[in-house]
């Protein structure tokens, strides 16, 4: 029965990836695949759907909705007021179209490190990147790779203190902070960031050698913010809120605890940080008052679809966890040769790839295995911060397989196909991060 259950889990995962790749909504795909897992695991279908699936999904929404909601509102305000675009344009003027890759990647890094959802960054950056690649006369099909590298990569998982949810989830399991394992984080930035950037620049040189040129996107309509009469200093409206979010998340809780003995949870910290970012953005754009309420409305509506997609993947994982075959999988992970860091890296990568979600896959892996990893770490004197950072790094690898929601959104926004642009996305946000996370886990496990 255990082997049949294990087969059911694998079949459910394959079916989930296949249907998501075909463009089917995960809102109905996840419960259907969960039922397949339950049937082959000999589990009651109603208990699986109404009980385990719904509880796992609801618990995730209960836990993370404030972060999704406020993050989406914050990002939409930065978008509709032109704040993010003003900052991006200022960076383009500073860097120039000659360094087209850097002119796209750096704004992505700043925005995601400032707390803007990577989904929002895709919509904000594409028009700017489109203009940069047109000026540089580079193939438009290379643009998704640069956006993905900047938005889906190191500022989501590796840079210390990032407010992205992939860096916050491990805090609850390991009792750590957003600044966990700074030395490992810096090494990870180099291991993942340098090869990714070199690859993208190599692709640019190859395109120029082949005589490839920019081809306009027939579906793209550029949004013009010039009619708003924005002041020349408006790029500060894009930079200051980002700084506020990062400082409020990483410094304010420590100051509050040291000065007033008030300890904030990770949930409270991110809510305070995002609210402060929203308020600062609104105050700096008070002259655009008519755009503020519509931006809040759109952000609020967009947050629902974002969290539901991830929550459904978590619900699927909740059904998987109660199957007999899952105990066999977890046993294999825990008994894997090498350190617990390597075991965690493999587990998070696999489940992030299976669900097509970095946060969803990591939540499933840590809810099932974190207590065992923490216990094993205490026995060997391993700092839990390393478990935090490896979990975060590993979530940003196999999650960007072709069925990933952010990948599908990016390709749809840029009007490119998987055949045209997915190779660059795969190498910079999947292959290099997977190798990097496994390598770091292996090395740290041996020498630390």
Image (cartoon, rainbow, N blue to C red):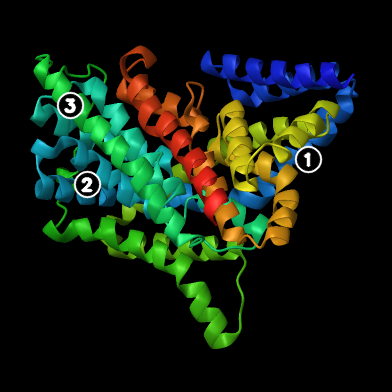
How far, Cα to Cα, is label 3 from label 2? Answer: 21 Å
Q: Quick one: 154 or 92, which is closer to the camera?
A: 154
Which of marks 3 and 1 precedes in the sequence? 1
Tell me residue 316's x, y (percent).
71, 30
**Residue that mark 1 sits on:** 55
Q: Residue at x 44, y 39 (%)?
A: 436
Observer-side mark, 3 or 2, equals: 3
Q: Quadrant of residue 17?
A: top right
> In the displayed structure, does residue 41 sit left or right of residue 155?
right
How far, Cα to Cα, is label 1 from label 2? Answer: 41 Å
Considering only vertical position in the picture, is 233 above or below 95? below
Tell me residue 312's x, y (percent).
66, 32
Which of marks 2 and 1 precedes in the sequence? 1
Element under disc 2: helix
The N terminus sits in image quarter: top right
Q: Quick one: 381 or 405, which is closer to the camera?
A: 381
How far, Cα to Cα, is label 1 from label 3? Answer: 48 Å
Observer-side mark, 1 or 3, equals: 3
Considering only vertical position in the picture, is 315 above or below 246? above
Considering only vertical position in the picture, is 149 above or below 235? above
Tell me residue 286's x, y (percent).
30, 62
**Residue that mark 3 sits on:** 204
Q: Residue at x 16, y 19 (%)?
A: 207
How many discs appear? 3
The answer, for residue 446, to whether it is visible in the render is yes
The C terminus sits in image quarter: bottom right
- The circle on residue 88 is 2
Q: Quadrant of residue 329?
A: top right
Tell me residue 159's x, y (percent).
41, 54
């Amino acid at each position: 029965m255990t082997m049949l259950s294990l087969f059911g889990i694998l079949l459910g995962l394959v079916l989930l990836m296949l249907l998501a790749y075909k463009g089917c909504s995960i809102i109905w795909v996840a419960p259907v695949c969960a039922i397949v897992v339950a049937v082959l695991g000999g589990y009651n279908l109603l208990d699986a759907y109404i009980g385990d699936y719904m509880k796992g999904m609801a618990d995730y929404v209960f836990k993370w909705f404030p972060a999704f909601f406020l993050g989406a509102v914050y990002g939409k305000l930065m978008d509709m007021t032109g704040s993010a675009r003003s900052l991006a344009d200022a960076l383009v003027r500073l860097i120039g179209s000659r360094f087209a890759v850097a002119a796209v990647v750096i704004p992505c890094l700043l925005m995601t490190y400032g707390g803007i959802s990577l989904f929002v960054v895709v919509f904000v950056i594409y028009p700017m990147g489109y203009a940069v690649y047109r000026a540089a006369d580079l193939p438009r099909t290379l643009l998704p790779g640069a956006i993905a590298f900047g938005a889906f990569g190191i500022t989501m998982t590796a840079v210390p203190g990032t407010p992205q949810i992939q860096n916050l989830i491990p805090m609850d399991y390991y009792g750590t902070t957003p600044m966990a394992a700074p030395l490992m984080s810096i090494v990870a930035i180099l291991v993942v960031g340098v090869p990714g950037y070199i690859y993208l620049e190599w692709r640019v040189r190859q395109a120029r050698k082949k005589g490839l040129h920019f081809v306009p996107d027939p579906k793209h309509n550029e949004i013009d913010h010039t009619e708003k009469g924005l002041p020349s200093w408006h790029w500060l409206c894009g930079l200051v809120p980002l700084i506020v979010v990062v400082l409020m998340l990483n410094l304010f809780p420590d100051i509050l605890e040291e000065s007033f003995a008030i300890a904030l949870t990770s949930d409270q910290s991110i809510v305070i940080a995002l609210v402060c970012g929203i308020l600062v953005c609104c105050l700096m754009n008070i002259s655009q008052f008519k755009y503020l309420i519509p931006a809040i409305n759109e952000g609020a509506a967009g947050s629902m679809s974002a969290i539901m997609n991830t929550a459904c993947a978590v619900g699927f994982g909740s059904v998987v966890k109660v199957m007999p075959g899952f105990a066999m999988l977890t046993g294999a992970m825990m008994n894997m040769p090498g350190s617990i860091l390597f075991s965690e890296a493999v587990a998070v990568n696999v489940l992030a790839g299976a669900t097509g979600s970095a946060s969803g896959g990591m939540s499933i892996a840590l809810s099932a295995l974190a207590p065992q990893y923490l216990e094993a770490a205490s026995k060997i004197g391993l700092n839990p911060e390393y478990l935090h950072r490896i979990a975060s790094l590993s979530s940003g690898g196999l999650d960007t397989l072709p069925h990933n929601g952010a990948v599908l959104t990016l390709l749809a926004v840029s009007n490119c196909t998987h055949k045209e642009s997915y190779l660059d996305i795969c190498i910079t946000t999947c292959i290099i991060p997977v190798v990097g996370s496994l390598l770091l886990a292996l090395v740290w496990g041996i020498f630390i």
